[in-house]
Image: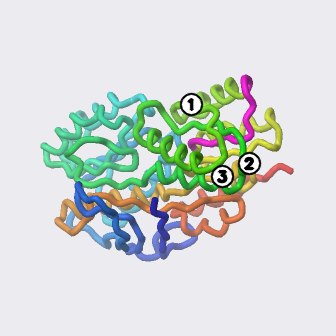
Amino acid sequence: MVTLLLSLSTSRAGTPADPVIDFLFTALHHKHSEGAALKRIPLLKQAQQRWRLCAILPNLKDSYWSLVRYGLESQAAVLNLELTLFEAAGYEAHRQQAELIEKRCLVNNYDALLLAAVDFSGLNEPVRLAHEAGLVVIDLINGISAAEVDSRVAVSYGDLAYTLGRHIAGRIKRGNVLWSPGPEGSVWAQDAQRGFRRALDESELQLAFSFMAAPFIRDQRSLLSSITEQQPFRLIAGTAVTAEAAASLKGRWGPDVEIFSYYYSPNIHPLIRCGEVQAAVYDYPALQGRVAVDQAVRILENHPFDYQLSTAQQLLTKDNLEQVLDTFHMPEALIRQLQQRACSD
């Protein structure tokens, strides 16, 4: 696992003060590279032409993906590109994503496909068709097994979950953990499962119950309610939606229950600030969107590029949340909104 630092030049609003921002990344130079190297990468200042980008996200009901959208749109605006964004209906909508590729991206003369896939292997055929049609293909965040991917922009969810697990183990020496890494069949949830288990194997904590579920608040709340009726848990960890759902049920369980998320979304920001969620790991989702656009243009214009880039991660708690807000790369209006919720006594 590599934890990286991030160096930004931004305004409070999260808008670049200068379109060139230097970041530290782990970088794999080629598809078959065995090791990752630290690298400082400036984002492009301008594009040679108005490239047309087709981006497909899992859904925008999840506030995590709203941040990714913000990053995609921000960098497209900096480079004066034409970006069209589509969303699917969630993590069971791989057929819908396939149709969006085939019926929207392939038939409208786009130059690049930026895909946050809902299925690791189920979209390989439409991705192959997109590549054969001449589109640059960027694997964005979720992971896809298609060989025709030109570049990957993604953190390791195994690393994020490991970081969270080690934090919990350092905070709480013993106990049973209820854990939900994400939807069944998604490679990122499986990676998180492995990373979290590895962290707990190095501690005296016990992974007493684990369940896979799509990150929808109603489903997560129902499952958590049912599970905890059978067995009480003091420690609950999982996706940001798991944390949000658990916080909404905390009144039933008492103040001793602690809640953790292995990634961040704006919906849990006030919960961290108010101490209802104890920690989350920030993986810079908006930045990942910006870098995906940047990578597409680099490939289209034959600039040097790295095959895979992984952004930094930052453990967030109530104690440091306000201090690191300037590095979040979010609109000022959203930051104000996140800070407005009053904390209960």
Label 1 to label 3: alpha-carbon separation:
20 Å
In the image, what residue occupies the spot 46% across and 71% down? 16
Q: The disc labelled 3 sits on which kind of residue?
A: Ala
Q: Mark 2 points at which residue?
A: 276
Which span of residues is magenta-colored? 229-239
The residue most toward the right is 345
Percent x, y of residue 146: 24, 41
Percent x, y of residue 178: 65, 36
Q: Name the residue under label 3.
A: 169
Task: State the SS at label 3.
Answer: helix
| Residue 234, magenta (yes or no) | yes
95 left or right, relative to 180:
left
Q: The disc labelled 1 sits on which kind of residue?
A: Phe
Sequence-wise, which precedes: disc 1 or disc 3?
Answer: 3
* Quadrant assignment, res 230: top right
- Of the pair 64 and 14, the residue shown nearer to us: 64
Question: Disc number at residue 83?
Answer: none
* For the residues bearing labels 1 and 3, Cβ distance under 8 angstroms: no
In the image, what residue occupies the spot 50% across and 47% down? 195
Task: State the SS at label 2.
Answer: loop
* Quadrant assignment, res 323: bottom right
Question: Disc number at residue 211?
Answer: 1
Sequence-wise, which precedes: disc 2 or disc 1?
Answer: 1
Q: The disc labelled 2 sits on which kind of residue?
A: Glu
53 left or right, relative to 209:
left
| Residue 36, magenta (yes or no) | no
* For the residues bearing labels 3 and 2, Cβ distance under 8 angstroms: no
**Residue count near mark 2 (Cα–Cα under 10 Å), binned few <14, some 14–19, many ≥20:** many
Residue 265 is at least partly visible in this image:
no
260 left or right, relative to 285:
right
